[in-house]
Structures are given as C-alpha cells and as structure tokens.
Image: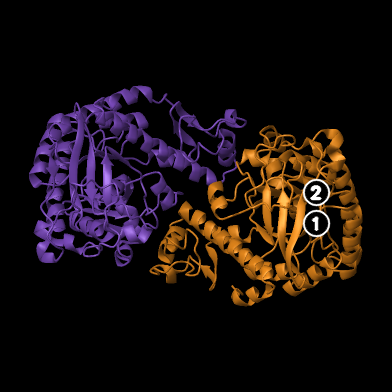
Chain colours: A orange, B purple
Amino acid sequence: MPLGTTGFASGCTPSDTIHTVSIEFQIDAQSGVARSGRLLTQHGEVATPVFMPVGTVASVKGVPQDILEELSVQILLGNTYHLYLRPGVEQVRKLGGLHRFMSWPRAILTDSGGFQVFSLNDLRKVTEEGVTFRSHLDGSSHFFSPESAMQAQIGLGADIIMAFDECTEYPADPVRTRESMELTLRWAARSKKHFEEHKNEVPWNCDRGSSEPTERSGDHLRTPAPAQALFGIVQGGMDRALRKESAERTVEVGFPGYAIGGLSVGEPRELTREIVEATLEHLPTDKPRYLMGVGTPDEIVEYASLGIDMMDCVLPTRAARHGLLFTSEGKISIKQARYAADEAPLDPNCGCRVCSRYSRAYLRHLYAANEVLAQVLNTIHNLSFYLDTMRAVRHSISLGRGARFLSEVWSQPKA
Amino acid sequence: MPLGTTGFASGCTPSDTIHTVSIEFQIDAQSGVARSGRLLTQHGEVATPVFMPVGTVASVKGVPQDILEELSVQILLGNTYHLYLRPGVEQVRKLGGLHRFMSWPRAILTDSGGFQVFSLNDLRKVTEEGVTFRSHLDGSSHFFSPESAMQAQIGLGADIIMAFDECTEYPADPVRTRESMELTLRWAARSKKHFEEHKNEVPWNCDRGSSEPTERSGDHLRTPAPAQALFGIVQGGMDRALRKESAERTVEVGFPGYAIGGLSVGEPRELTREIVEATLEHLPTDKPRYLMGVGTPDEIVEYASLGIDMMDCVLPTRAARHGLLFTSEGKISIKQARYAADEAPLDPNCGCRVCSRYSRAYLRHLYAANEVLAQVLNTIHNLSFYLDTMRAVRHSISLGRGARFLSEVWSQPKA
C-alpha cells in the first residue's frame, strides 16, 4: 500500500526541519476509486474517508469537547479568519496552540482564512500581494497574504494547515477563472516557501505532551516528528482543463495532501461531481484528497465513493441550530407542529445519546421555546448522523462494496 | 427519628386516594437546629438539605439531562407558569407528565405559578377567586386560581407540588400584609381541597415504569404509592407575628411539607434570616421545610444551618449565562480581560468536568465570542459548585459540626 510522507523524523531543532515528517497517510482498502485508510497526525490517527466537524472559533457550537470525543470525532476544523479576529493568533500561540487552548488532544485542521475573506464581498480588496479586508465584527481593517496566513496557521498550530488561495466565484468567465487560478498557484508557492522557513515555530514543537498517538494507531505507522502538514488547494472554476492544469501545477509545487477548493459555491450538483472527478484524475493517489465545504449526507457518501478522503461542512451544525435534523428516514424540521406529541425518537435507527433518550415531542418543545438545549442536542444528533454515515462508508469500502450504495439508502428527500 | 408521611400505600384506584402516601421524610442527623436527611419521592430519594436547580420550561438551560445525572442532581424544579404557556399542561399530561416528557427519571418539584404571575406587575389582576394575567410571550389573557393551579400541577405530574399563594410584595404595610396572608390561607385550603379530590389524576398514577427508587434508597424507607405531595406555603411578609400565625394556620390546614414564601424579594439579608428563623420555630420538625428562591452559596449554607431542608434559585444558572461563576475562592466574572491568558482552571478546588478540562482563558474566550458553549460549561460549573456545597453541608451536619462553618470558609466577596 502506498505510504506518503514528506521525509523522516530526526528531531525538532530548526536545522532539522528539512527532514521533519508532518503526516502519514495509508490506504488500507480500495473499492473502485473509493478508498479507506488512515491519516496519522501529530495528534492521533484519523480514519478516512472522514467528515470533519467545524469548530469555527475553537468550539463546535454548543457541544463540549468530551461529547465530541464520545462521538469519536478524530479531527476538527477551525477557521483561521475567525480565530485571527478573536481571540487572536498570538493569544492562542502563547497558550500553546489550539489543541491546548481548547483542550482538544486530537487532530485539528485550519483553513487559510481565504474562503471567509472572499465571502466578505464588500469588505475586501485583492492584489497580487494579498487581500485587504474589514472585520465583520467591528469593521477594522486587516491584511492576509500567503505569508501572513501561514504565520497565523503556524501560530494556531493545527496538524493540517491550508495554502492561502483565492476561491474563484461562480459563475466566472474563462479569463477571470484562469487569472484566479494562476494567482492561487503563485500564492501556493509563496505559502509553501514561508511555511518551510517557519514551520519549526509551531507552538507544540518539541513538546509532545499532548501529541501521543491514540490507541487506534496501527502498529506499522510510526509517530511522525512534530510538524504541521501544509496542503495545497486546486482551483480552476468549472473548467475541466483548468482544473487539470491547476492540479498538475499544484502537485509540482509539492504538498503532503491536496484539497479541491472553489466548489459548492452555488453550481449545480452534477457539475460539482463532474469537476471533482475531473480533478481527482490528476491528483496523486497516495496522498490524502480533501474536498472543501461539502455537503449533505448523500453528497459526502457520493464524494467518498469518488475517492475523496476528507470533507468538512457547516451543514450538520448550522442546520441543527435551525432545527433541521438528518435521519436515516430523511430530513426532519423539528419545529413543525406535527412533532408536538410525537413520542418517537428523532431517528429510530440512531443510537446517539439524543435518540436514545429524548422524544421528538421534547426536541420540538425545546426548539419552539427557544431553549439552548435544542441547539446542543440537535447538533449532537446531526454530528452523530454524519459520523455514523462516514463509519458506514469506511466499512463498506473495506468490504469492497464501495460507498455509493449508501447514497441510495440514505438519499435525503428534497427540502 | 421522626418519619412524616400522609398515610399508607394501599393501591392506586381513585377510591384509595385517602390512604395514598405521597412522600416520606427521614432525618438522619442533627447538629443544633440543622438537620440532614432523606426525602423519598415517587421518583427516587433526595438527600437533604438540597439545592434544587431550576429547569424552567422542562430544561436546565443548556445542560443535557445525563450531565445533570452525572452532577448527582436528585430533584429539579419546573415552573408551572412557563410550562402552562409552553408547551401547555395538556400536552405534557398526554405525554405522560414532566418526567417522561423531558426524560428525567428523578424527582421534580413544580411551583404553583403564583410567584411568576405576581411578577407580571402590569399584566395581572388579583381577586378572591384568583389571578387574571397576560402572557409575557404573546399578551394573551389567562386565569390562575388555586383550583386551576392544582389542575395544572397535577397534569404536569411533579413529585412535589405547591399550593397557590400570593407572594406579598416588599415593602408592604401591616394591613396589606395581613390581607395577603389571609388570602394565601384561604387559597391553601382551596388548593388542598382540589388536590385531594383530583390527585388520582396524576399522569403516572398506576404506571410505575419510571418511578423505581434509585439505588441510594435506604433499606428502611418504603417506596410510597403513586401520589404527588402538596406543600403549603407560609406568607406574612416581614412581620414575625404574622409569620407565626401564617405558619400555625397553614399547619392546621395540613400538608406533608411546608415552604416559606415571600422572602428574597428585595429585603435586607439580615431580615430574611430573622424571618426564616421566626417562621421555622412554628413549623413541624418532622416535615420538610422549603425556603423558596434562595440564594447565594453562603446563603444556602446559612439557611441549611437554620434547619431549612430544601432551597431553589435561578442564581447559579442565570449568573452562569452572564459569565458570573462561583468558586471556592470567590466569585469570578469570566468576561474580564484579566482571564484572557489565564491557564488555570476556573476553580482549582473543583473537580467538575469543566474545571478538570478547560482553562479560564478558554472560558473567557467562549464568553467573549458569544459562543453557546460558554453558557453550557458555565452552567455546569455553577451547578456543580452549588451541589458540592450542599454535599459538604450534609456531610458537616452528619458529623455534628453544623453547616455554618462553611459559610465562613466560602463567604463570597461582594460583587
């Protein structure tokens, strides 16, 4: 089985950085183009394909960390833009990095801040150097460049960090799409250069206290030496040729993992799928492939079946806050009066702590009464459903049955 | 040791109601006038003196029931006024009562709704018959009488329910205080009459599925037959003579437990203490005595030392939502910038799941970032602190050392 690393562990002084291993990725089973495997990070092992819950400002909104552990969450996503604004990168760095700050001993991935910054349509200005933007909190002016985004992510100290890219808007004409892709490629090289020069500054470097691998670590996967892993991001809009070129040239820059960005930005789902497939053809099979910002339960199953290893999305947590709950029988809008006297569990096929204890009637009441516990319980269930879904996908792949059959079983009715 | 009951169990058909036991109360240790004991309810045993967390609309805001169980909460308080408005008594009754509705197998006490209704200063009108009030939610008009308050509380099905009283405002002149006290006495008799005629209508009557006593039940305390316990409420304002009269005449009406109402309504703390002591002198020692709506950690210790068995207050939960945290070293306002880089636990002497995992810096960040997890964790800690305090009080009484020494140790600095 292919084993992709960036080198071999040999210590943690600055002069050793060239030989520092960041992550290891091992594929354990394949079924068609789908694969299941393990990503070994500085903070434990992650079974793939994985869905990463979003913990925007160092918290998965409403859910204590011990409950995330009970849900078997192995990796969380943090948003650099939000953490940069509050509590601030320097604050987190001084407190030992995100893991220690939020008491989360397992793996973390941070985005580069690029996507959030580009979402601030009226509040940003892009130049070759970087992006000037205004805070959504207080309107204050800030600047992100590939270098400063690396600096921020090194300070936060996630296990996996992302190159600073430009998320091309949808739709975009061919000229604009190419220009944006080229900018992302130049920024990818600058991101890597800055990262290589500064990666020894990660706050947990030379402090392995909380970075022991979990008991799930495979015997033949060594624990990598302390280093973050920087992933590159493929752009290229909805143009298959540009996606191919972006993938090949990003691979030329060279990263231990590759993300597909610029999708799930408003395009039709069939197009998303087409671009994902077209892009994956040009990414190395021995490196983790991360599709950013997706999706619904049946979408994550579908993309796993195409060979995606990592995904993240605010959908399960955000939908939970709006009373939209995913179940094995379809989506439920718990605010509806029809559930007011429904004593059944939310999902009779779910074993989570919410479904095993509370009725739909109670959850509907909590939501209607605007009780905070509604958000807490709804979020726990939705995350549980997503994690169970990915567990089933991994199991299915390991049995050689592929992941796609699940998308038929669990296909969600349209809202 | 005195054992106070209202009769003996002999079945649960309507014709048996005269002989139905509601609760049993046993005093296990005394130290001066302070006592520790056990209250055996239809839904488990409650160690006294007890602090009852407030779960206004069938939820302790932000805290899942299993965490309340982990905190060893043995009894919760629900607010009849809020539950009556939302989700509605009939809804809860049809779903088997509050215990089943909210999946809480341990004891529950509901207030009569009187205190909330009287808090609606501009939205209520009091007559001999009862109180007309407007909902704080939608302005709709409603009417509570002793009879309808009993009907509501029987439908909700708490283990302990409260007579409908008038909470006399502070200050009030002697004429007004006597009139109010007399009204409460007439309403107490009407409450009891209606309750005795309808107590067999409790939703869990003849359904003991979830009412097994907990493993903490003492060997020599029998499980009472299904029935709620109706407590009387002593009023009389800040007048010792009226308190004496109210206590004696409420005892004449006859209840399995007595509450002291109309305190903690704005009067000085020394006066509260004086009235509590003056009232307790005239309440039976073999029945549970419940001081409503108190207090700070040192107040609950003080009142326990005076012989109070039960207390409730929104303070720990409400303060938590405002970032005010009780610790063994005094009160902490976690929003303060001084905690932004403080890696210490909230309370180094607390073993709760919050103090054993998170730093003050993280809790301060969650509060500053308006994260829901702030409310969840802060509430868990404050409840843990209150429950630990009462545990220490019970232990102290059982050792014959009284409870008051704790009020010196844990006296809170003034805000």
The reply to whether the C-beta atoms of the residues labelled 2 and 1 are less than 8 Å apart is: no
Q: Disc 2 on helix, strand or loop? A: strand
**Whether residue B404 is situated above or below residue A268 in the rendered picture:** above
Horizontal and vertical percent position of residue A170: 79, 65
The residue under the point 50% across, 60% down is A352
Rendered image quadrant of residue A331: bottom right
**Disc 2: host chain:** A
Q: Which residue is mark 1?
A: A3
Rendered image quadrant of residue B134: bottom left
The residue under the point 26% across, 28% down is B399
Q: Disc 1 on helix, strand or loop? A: strand
Horizontal and vertical percent position of residue A9: 80, 42
Q: What amino acid type is highlighted by mark number 2?
A: Leu
Q: What amino acid type is highlighted by mark number 1?
A: Leu
Classed neighbour count for the residue bearing mark 2: other residues with Cα under 10 Å, few (<14), some (14–19), many (≥20): many
Q: Is residue B196 visible?
A: yes
Horizontal and vertical percent position of residue B181: 15, 41
Which is more N-terminal, label 1 or label 2? Answer: 1
Q: Nearer the viewer, residue B109 or A353?
A: A353
Classed neighbour count for the residue bearing mark 1: other residues with Cα under 10 Å, few (<14), some (14–19), many (≥20): few
- Choose mark 2 or mark 1, whichever is in front: 1
Q: Which quadrant would the N terminus of chain B be assigned to in this image?
A: top left
Q: Which residue is mark 2?
A: A230
Q: Nearer the viewer, residue A130 or A123?
A: A130
The residue under the point 79% across, 36% down is A12
Q: CA distance from mark 2 to mark 1?
A: 17 Å
Q: Is residue A313 visible?
A: no
Horizontal and vertical percent position of residue A118: 77, 53
**Disc 1: host chain:** A
Rendered image quadrant of residue B193: bottom left
**Whether residue B83 is situated above or below residue B245 in the rendered picture:** below
